[in-house]
């Protein structure tokens, strides 16, 4: 084992974070729990994930339990975590593991990559942490540590391949899972984005960025491009009993499989009210509400105008009618909750 690996593992043994999905040193990791946590932690903070992780395990303590659940139930439990494709793949992966692998995750990084929703990072994380194999999961924390340790000048995201290769040179044959978690902890608690605590770092004397410049200048990044703004109209359609129309979004695409307030397509060009009404889910006397619902996704901003109307008699519609007090029982993403709040606030 290299000196660097020993230094980091010694630090990890003293300073390791106490996380719900992390096993004590004398315990064997559960691949299901490792996989569950890694999927949830993608683009989501540890603080946010903790309660969801606990809730999911209480509902579905085994991969077979999760596989047997209804997708809508999983999506509903996922509300608030965002990036809902992860929830759909979580459910699909559980079904594949249960059906094709007798409820056991494959003990191979290559075979893990064949499972739905598992990319190179997750496959390496499960292989190393759950099975003790020599694998190198590289997330944002690891990229930051490596870019500073070696003072990598190439800008992101072009530098990702080089950073992965450098990270792989650090991974020891033994305790690969602990080393992977140590790298994550180092990036999360010491080698942080804006203020690195270099004096506490076990690699302080080796870090080229610290020795030759300013660590927080790394990883190098290209200037951010401004996010485009898309626009849409949402249709708040009610009927005589006070219920509101919901419909399910297509399985593929943004918010796939989630319930929504019916809306027009989302596009950068403005749409007139008359053109928007051509996409209305039913016949009604429509009226636009004052104000705009704003929401930001990873790659764009969205501005939604809410149009309210009461269904005219015998007008056919596709969707499901839901009483207002029952909306909480449906898997509505944050954007749709904002639309509901806006419609209820402005409806007289």
Image (spheres, rainbow, N blue to C red):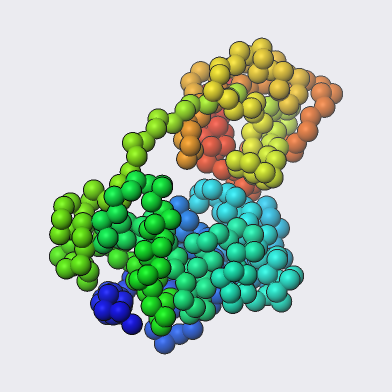
Residue at 41 percent of width and 83 percent of height: 174
Q: Where in the figure is residue 335, as x and y percent of width and height?
A: 53, 37
Quadrant location of the C terminus in the rendered image: top right
Residue furthest out toward the right:
314
Against 61, residue 116 (above or below) is above
Residue at 74 percent of width and 70 percent of height: 99
Residue at 34 percent of width and 46 percent of height: 155
Residue at 30 percent of width and 79 percent of height: 2
Quadrant location of the N terminus in the rendered image: bottom left
Identify which residue, 119 or 228, lies in the foreground.
Answer: 119
Residue 202 falls in image quadrant? bottom left
Report the number of discs.
Answer: 0
Q: Where in the figure is residue 127, as x and y percent of width and height?
A: 52, 73
Identify which residue, 275 or 100, lies in the foreground.
Answer: 100
Against 186, residue 341 (above or below) is above
Identify which residue, 251 or 204, lies in the foreground.
Answer: 204
For residue 290, side relative to residue 141 (left or right): right
Is residue 255 among the parts visible in the rendering? yes
Against 221, residue 172 (above or below) is below
For residue 1, side relative to residue 62 (left or right): left
């Amino acid at each position: 084992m290299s000196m660097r690996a020993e230094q980091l593992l010694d630090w990890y043994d003293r300073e390791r974070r106490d996380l719900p999905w992390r096993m004590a040193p004398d315990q064997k990791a559960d691949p299901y729990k490792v996989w569950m946590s890694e999927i949830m932690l993608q683009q989501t903070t540890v603080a946010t994930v903790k309660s969801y992780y606990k809730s999911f395990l209480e509902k579905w303590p085994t991969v077979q339990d999760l596989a047997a659940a209804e997708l809508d139930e999983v999506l509903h439990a996922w509300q608030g975590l965002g990036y809902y494709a992860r929830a759909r793949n979580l459910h699909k992966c559980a079904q594949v593991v249960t059906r094709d692998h007798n409820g056991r995750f494959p003990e191979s990084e290559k075979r893990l990559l064949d499972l739905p929703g598992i990319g190179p990072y997750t496959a390496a994380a499960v292989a190393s942490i759950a099975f003790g194999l020599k694998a190198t999961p590289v997330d944002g924390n690891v990229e930051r540590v490596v870019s500073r340790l070696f003072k990598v000048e190439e800008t992101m995201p072009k530098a990702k391949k080089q950073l992965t290769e450098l990270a792989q040179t650090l991974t020891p044959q033994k305790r690969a899972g602990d080393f992977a978690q140590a790298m994550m902890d180092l990036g999360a608690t010491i080698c942080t984005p804006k203020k690195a605590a270099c004096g506490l770092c076990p690699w302080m004397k080796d870090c080229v960025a610290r020795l030759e410049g300013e660590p927080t200048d790394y990883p190098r990044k290209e200037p951010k491009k401004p996010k485009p703004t898309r626009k849409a109209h949402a249709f708040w359609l009610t009927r005589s009993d006070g219920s509101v129309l919901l419909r399910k979004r297509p399985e593929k695409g943004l918010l796939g499989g989630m319930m929504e307030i019916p809306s027009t397509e989302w596009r950068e060009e403005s749409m007139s009210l008359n053109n928007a009404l051509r996409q209305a889910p039913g016949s009604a006397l429509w009226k636009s509400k004052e104000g705009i619902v704003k929401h930001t996704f990873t790659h764009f901003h969205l501005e939604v105008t809410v149009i309210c109307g009461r269904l005219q008699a015998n007008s056919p519609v596709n969707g499901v009618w839901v009483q207002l007090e029952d909306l909480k029982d449906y898997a509505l993403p944050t954007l749709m909750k904002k639309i509901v709040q806006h419609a209820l606030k402005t409806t007289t």
